[in-house]
């Protein structure tokens, strides 16, 4: 080893090695964080930042949560990984908590959200082969985002995600969100060929756009009547982000399959597909697998995340802080012409402005606020679920100052 981690301290050193050795698939902001505490991050110069991004809705309990760290340390001392060819205590306990707090189901563990959606995709194909005379078609929504693997990229209703890779997976139709008439027409004409409908209850990557309750209820009814699996992609919205443990609780209907990741492991990679008991027997032994999915340390971190989230009444803070931030943003909208729309549920909030927002996010970063620009002209606010009123107010002050500059 040429240098130890402790020897590489400057942003320039980190940038040089990144550009020399790492594939350039990310457009990175000019900062490197070395540690965090609560809703704050600290860079190589020890500058403090308010975190309105949470690693893109991942570090939901904030940084440096003592119980999470202790759980990971304790698990690492005992056992980190065996395999899914043997039983796993941590995995079994995590699955029980997920099912008890969602809907009657079985769980398949993965390393990521894309892999959870891949599992759901394969399950739907199996369902179509076994129960619908070989049906292979899917419905998903325009402007959706379901992942970067080939199947999940194909499920994503955005041309920019497909571009450059040649033909995508066929038999996927992208529907306009919240258009019940279009959904009814498509299912009426092609329902026998459909194996699944994939829905993000809140479209996150395209700028935080919640689906209407009426639309979700209609999708549930039509899926049941036409023997189509209804899949809810809750990779961003699950694990408390919307003020309930899962976003489907806002809509009053259960999915047939729900996919999770992001906030589930507090930064330790883990995903999950929950499959309703009615459909759980479709995928049998040897039909799917994951070497690392739900290994001891990932499952332990996720179990502790849920224990804290449920046991500490954090969801009440999500609702209170979400209401405060939305109120502040609406007040800004009334005074700052560049703000076109504010929307969201809980601490999953989007702001549409009248121009590309990358420079605004960069200006916020320079002034001590980490915020995400997504979908060209949308700013996304997804802070830790534990954020305090004082910190939320300071973060919004920074954002407002940068938006007021714009003409």
Image (cartoon, rainbow, N blue to C red):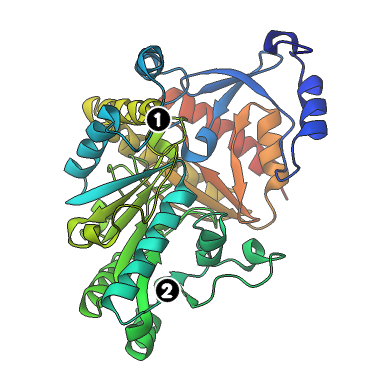
Q: Which mark is residue 13?
A: none
Image quarter of residue 187:
bottom left
The structure residue drawn at horizontal position 26% and vertical position 61%, both measured from the top left corner, is 256
The structure residue drawn at horizontal position 66% and vertical position 13%, both measured from the top left corner, is 46
**Does 257 appear above or below 90?**
below
Give the image location of residue 41, x and y in percent. 57, 22
Q: How many marks?
A: 2
Q: Secondary structure at mark 2?
A: strand
Label 1 close to label 2 by CB (< 8 Å): no
Any part of residue 187 in sight: no
Q: Secondary structure at mark 1?
A: helix
Nearest-to-viewer mark from 1 and 2: 1
How busy is the neighbourhood of tag 1: few (under 14 within 10 Å), some, or many (20 plus)? Answer: many
The residue at which mark 1 appears reads as 298
The residue at which mark 2 appears reads as 139
Residue 286 versus residue 379: which sits nearer the camera? 286
Give the image location of residue 322, x and y in percent. 38, 40
Spatial distance from mark 1 to mark 2, Cα to Cα? 32 Å
The structure residue drawn at horizontal position 38% and vertical position 28%, both measured from the top left corner, is 82
Residue 20 appears left or right of 86: right
């Amino acid at each position: 080893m040429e240098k130890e981690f402790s020897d590489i301290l400057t942003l320039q050193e980190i940038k040089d090695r990144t550009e020399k050795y790492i594939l350039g698939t990310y457009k990175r902001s000019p900062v490197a964080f070395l540690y965090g505490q609560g809703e704050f991050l600290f860079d190589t110069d020890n500058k403090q930042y308010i975190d309105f991004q949470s690693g893109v809705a991942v570090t939901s309990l904030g940084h440096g949560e003592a119980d999470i760290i202790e759980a990971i340390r304790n698990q690492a001392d005992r056992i980190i990984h065996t395999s899914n060819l043997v039983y796993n205590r941590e995995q079994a306990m995590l699955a029980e908590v997920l099912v008890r707090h969602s809907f009657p189901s079985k769980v398949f563990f993965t390393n990521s959200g894309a892999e959870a959606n891949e599992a759901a995709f394969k399950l739907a194909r199996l369902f179509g082969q076994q129960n619908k005379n070989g049906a292979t078609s899917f419905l998903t929504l325009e402007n959706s985002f379901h992942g970067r693997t080939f199947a999940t990229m194909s499920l994503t209703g955005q041309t920019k995600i497909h571009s450059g890779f040649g033909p995508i997976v066929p038999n996927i139709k992208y529907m306009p969100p919240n258009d019940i008439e279009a959904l009814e027409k498509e299912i009426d004409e092609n329902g026998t060929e459909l194996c699944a409908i994939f829905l993000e209850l809140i479209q996150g990557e395209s700028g935080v756009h919640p689906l209407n309750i009426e639309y979700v209820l209609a999708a549930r009814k039509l899926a049941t009547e036409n023997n189509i699996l209804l899949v809810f992609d809750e990779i961003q919205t699950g694990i408390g982000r919307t003020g309930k443990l899962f976003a489907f609780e806002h809509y009053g209907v259960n999915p047939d399959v729900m996919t999770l990741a992001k906030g589930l492991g507090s930064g330790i990679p883990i995903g999950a597909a929950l499959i309703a008991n009615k459909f759980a027997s479709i995928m049998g032994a040897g039909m799917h697998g994951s070497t690392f999915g739900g290994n001891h340390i990932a499952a332990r971190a996720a179990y502790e995340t849920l224990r804290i989230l449920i046991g500490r009444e954090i969801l009440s803070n999500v609702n209170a802080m979400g209401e405060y931030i939305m109120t502040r943003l609406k007040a800004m909208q009334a005074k700052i012409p560049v703000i076109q729309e504010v929307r969201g549920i809980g601490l999953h909030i989007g702001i549409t402005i009248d121009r590309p927002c990358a420079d605004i996010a960069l200006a916020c970063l320079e002034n001590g606020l980490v915020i995400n620009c997504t979908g060209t002209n949308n700013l996304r606010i997804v802070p830790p679920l534990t954020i305090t009123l004082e910190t939320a107010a300071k973060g919004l002050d920074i954002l407002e100052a940068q938006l007021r500059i714009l003409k």
